[in-house]
Amino acid sequence: MEYKLTFGKYNEALKRNKLLGLKCKDCQTITCPPKMTCGECAGVDLEVTELGGKGKIVTFTTCYVAPEGRENEVPYTIVMVELDEGPWILGNLIDIDPFRVGMELIGKRVKLGHKVFIGDKYSNGDAARPLFSFAD
Amino acid sequence: MRRVAIVGGGHTDFVFESPKTGKELFAEAAMEAINTSNLKPKDIQAIYCGNGLSDFSEGQVMIQSYVADDIGCFNVPATRFEGACASATLAIRDAAMWVASGTYEIVLVGGTEKATALGTPLATRTFAMAHDSRYESPTGLTFPAYFAMLAHLYSLKYNIPLAKLKEQMAMVSVQSHEYGVKNPHAQFKKEITIEKVLSGFTVASPLQLLDCCPFSDGAAALVLASEDVAKKLTPKPVYIVGTGQASSGRMGSQYKYLPRIRARELAVKQAYDMSGLGPKDIDVCELHDCFSIASIIAAESLGFADFGKGGYLWEKGETRIGGKIPINISGGLKSKGHPIGATGASQTYEVAKQLRGELADQGRQVEGAKVGLVDTLGGDGILCDLILKVD
């Protein structure tokens, strides 16, 4: 059984600022990032759908110790965003001073862009991740 | 299914930059376990070895086979268990199953790690490999960052101001160091203060350096045997009366439950149900305090406190010897150290020692402890819980 939406297709779309997910025709839940089955009911009757890329921050951290090869990125802020369609998705946040962010971030509306992690010798290639900024 | 008991154990010192190899560390703990069980290597029928990262730290895959040969357990089936920080606990659960099933009478189980050989940047990179490599790691997610995000979620969900929560978190670390001073195998034998925790370098906001366990090298091992054999080998068998294990998807997949970790609640329920025991029966607990906030979240999931109230256990001293539920009297991952592949075996070794009443001379015996709980979290997370009991 083939994936409806592979990492490869998801990644290529995100590089064009298009956030793809899967809509379950059985329970209507949106799964994003994609999986083989519906994240809610494990159903397999799924269709690829483009999400709006907007949502609100549910939690965050500013990271000061980076994995090898990414030391020059610190400090960087990671946010978990609840998309308007329901799923929670991890990304980075820009347009802020990472040293100064606090609990006031939670609940803030954000919109999606992207940035590509170019990869390292372990990652089997690059991977785009959501890069959020405050929505108007 | 037959009853299975821990017969003997071994534990190396947990240290920074061990001069020994991962295999040597395991072998030293294993031989101590075999010797204290009054056995010889030829008596061991199978080996279960927890190991997280020796591929990266030493260029050694398949360490379990070389360990078996090194300690003279020639040609026995040897299996490596990789579940990040829960590796050895998974190994113990499976080892116990093989004995309970009647396949083996006597087996060796343990874990080993040389995490400090990696150095902090590569250790941070390889530990973070336990996140979803395609959908989480590209953000630069690390384990401190993961638990940092849980801390913020926790503060919000339970309406505990972050400053108050941070103080409770600091108390977790302070207590761990207090008991670590008394544990001869502990990596840090130094007391710390709340002020020191709160003035440390920020690793991932709001977690500061002393909210985080260290990178460590070390090993621990146990001999397990069927009840009949165990009774012949030791006057004090420690029975594994309950086990449970569960898995999770990536952080976003857990959105309905966070900051609660659903897999832990499922795993410990399996262990409680299997043993016929509950949280109130537990006399001593070693839980997975990779970060201070992780201890608070774990204590709630294990049933020792209401959700949102875990921090008060430490604040009121209920987690100390003499308290309602003594937790991490070994010093925990924080002070004892966290060689990830060995941690579950170390926790189990520690609880077995408590139940045998062998820690009085170290000044950290929980008097009269009969039932203990081991809780280990791998990544974010594989959860494995064990309930140990003496008759």
Image (spheres, helix red, strand yellow):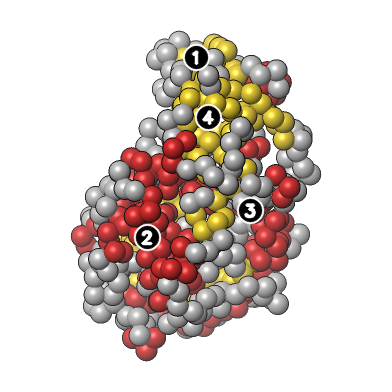
Helix, strand or loop status at disc 1: strand
Name the residue tied to disc 1.
A23
Name the residue tied to disc 4.
A89
Q: Quadrant of the image for the C terminus of chain B?
A: bottom left
Q: Is residue B344 above or below residue A2?
A: below
Graded by Cα atoms within 10 Å as few (under 14), some (14 to 19) or many (20 or more), the crowding at tag 1 reads many
Q: CA distance from mark 3 to mark 2?
A: 22 Å
> Which is in the foreground here, disc 3 or disc 1?
3
> Which is in the foreground here, disc 2 or disc 1?
2
Q: CA distance from mark 2 to mark 1?
A: 43 Å
Helix, strand or loop status at disc 3: loop
Name the residue tied to disc 3.
A65
Q: Which percent across, then down, holds residue A65?
A: 63, 53
Q: CA distance from mark 2 to mark 4?
A: 30 Å
- Label ID, residue A31: none
Amino acid type, label 2? Glu
Q: Earlier in the sequence, mark 1 or mark 4?
A: 1
Q: Is residue B117 left or right of residue B191?
A: right
Q: Which percent across, then down, holds residue B340?
A: 56, 61
Q: Quadrant of the image for the N terminus of chain B?
A: bottom left
Q: Tell me which residue sits at (27%, 59%) in the image.
A: B312
Assess whether mark 4 and mark 2 are in contact (beta carbons under 8 angstroms): no
Q: Is residue B375 above or below residue B323?
A: above
Q: How many numbered tags mark residues here?
A: 4
Q: Is residue B205 left or right of residue B269?
A: right
Q: Is residue B307 above or below residue B123?
A: above
Name the residue tied to disc 2.
B167
Q: Tell me which residue sits at (71%, 22%) in the image.
A: A15
Q: Earlier in the sequence, mark 4 or mark 3?
A: 3
